[in-house]
């Protein structure tokens, strides 16, 4: 399956375009919900939360607010508790009619969903506006959600556990040589072409830093870069790690994709057999499992430390 710009942006973040829902049915829904949600109720802890964002959904369940969640995004798959919850679209296609039908008192949307946020504001429905950031933003978001949902103590406990887990990884790899590491988040199958690599901004870059690596594109102030093969060769990468979510590649396909790097045989990572694939949403969803994902990176980069 080819990996293009649309797939990569869907995997990460600042990629989503809203669309207008201006039909009569939606207008009626806006009016009815606006009348049904008094201001006093909005000031209380929300009891009907809709989350379009997988990271936010996982955070809500981690802090004990799961029973308050009544709708989730189309790409929410990790938690078994959400199997029967209504789906309300995703980053490119939030289903506003479905969201309004759930009569929410808090909706978590991406910061880029400006039109959808305006629709909710007209209905007096509070919005939790979210943008991907670094590792510090993960714990800050968890704490903010705790205060918004009435679970501040539980959120503080989750956030501190994450901070402690990351610090343990830092200590484990401290003092070791930091190999130059290339993290690839997508490319064309079977060839080293249309490569998308992790840049020097965002949670993945921070995870690499904690895991004891030097990001080869760490000086590029973007979350993702698209380097040509010639540029990749100049990085001198000691380790190459490709990330994929579950269900995309089987074991044989992974072997073929690793072999594709043999075309860049002068790279140290290829010469020494340090080309790896990591499979799992814990690596691409900046939520409560971020310590697990960071530890997996560290184990590949510094196997001797584990």
Image (cartoon, helix red, strand yellow):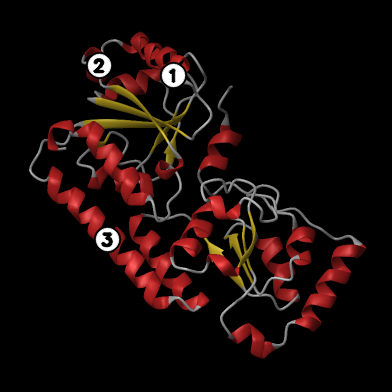
Residue at the image point whose x is 51% and y is 18% from the top? 189
The vertical placement of 181 against 77, above or below, is above
In this figure, which residue is indicated by the disc labeled 2? 273
Mark earlier in primary sequence (2, 3): 3
Query: Residue 232 or 305: which is nearer the viewer?
Result: 305
The vertical placement of 155 against 261, above or below, is below
Residue at the image point whose x is 25% and y is 21% from the top? 274
Among all residues in the image, which is located at the extreme bottom?
A: 40
Residue at the image point whose x is 13% and y is 37% from the top? 305
Q: Position of residue 119 (x, y in %)?
A: 74, 68
Query: Mark 2 falls on what kind of element?
Result: loop
Mark 1 touches mark 2? (CB < 8 Å): no
Q: Position of residue 125 (x, y in %)?
A: 68, 75
In this figure, which residue is indicated by the disc labeled 1? 251
Mark 3 touches mark 1? (CB < 8 Å): no
Q: Quadrant of the C terminus?
A: top left
- Label 2: how many Cα within 10 Å (few below 14, some 14–19, many 20+): few
């Amino acid at each position: 399956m080819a990996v293009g710009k649309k797939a990569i942006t869907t995997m990460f973040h600042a990629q989503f375009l809203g669309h207008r829902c201006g039909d009569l049915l939606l207008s009626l829904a806006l009016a009815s919900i606006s009348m049904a949600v008094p201001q006093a109720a909005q000031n209380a802890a929300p009891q009907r939360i809709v989350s379009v964002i997988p990271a936010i959904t996982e955070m809500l369940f981690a802090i004990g607010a799961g029973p308050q969640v009544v709708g989730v995004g189309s790409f929410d798959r990790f938690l078994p508790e959400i199997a029967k919850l209504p789906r309300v679209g995703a980053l490119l296609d939030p289903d506003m009619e479905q969201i309004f039908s759930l009569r929410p008192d808090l909706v978590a949307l991406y910061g880029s969903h400006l039109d959808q946020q305006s629709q909710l504001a007209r209905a007096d429905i509070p919005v939790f506006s979210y943008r991907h950031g670094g590792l510090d933003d993960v714990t800050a978001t968890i704490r903010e959600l705790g205060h918004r949902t009435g679970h501040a103590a539980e959120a503080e406990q989750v956030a501190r556990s994450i901070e402690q887990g990351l610090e343990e990884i830092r200590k484990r790899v401290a003092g070791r040589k930091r190999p130059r590491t290339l993290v690839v988040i997508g490319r064309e199958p079977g060839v080293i072409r249309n490569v998308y690599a992790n840049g020097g901004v965002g949670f993945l870059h921070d995870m690499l830093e904690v895991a004891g690596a030097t990001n080869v594109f760490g000086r590029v102030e973007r979350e993702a870069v698209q380097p040509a093969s010639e540029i990749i060769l100049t990085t001198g990468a000691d380790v190459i790690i490709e990330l994929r979510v579950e269900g995309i590649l089987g074991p044989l396909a992974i072997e073929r994709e690793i072999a594709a790097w043999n075309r860049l045989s002068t790279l140290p990572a290829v010469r020494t057999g340090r080309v790896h694939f990591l499979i799992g949403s814990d690596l691409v969803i900046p939520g409560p499992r971020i310590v697990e994902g960071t530890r997996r990176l560290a184990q590949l980069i510094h196997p001797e430390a584990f």
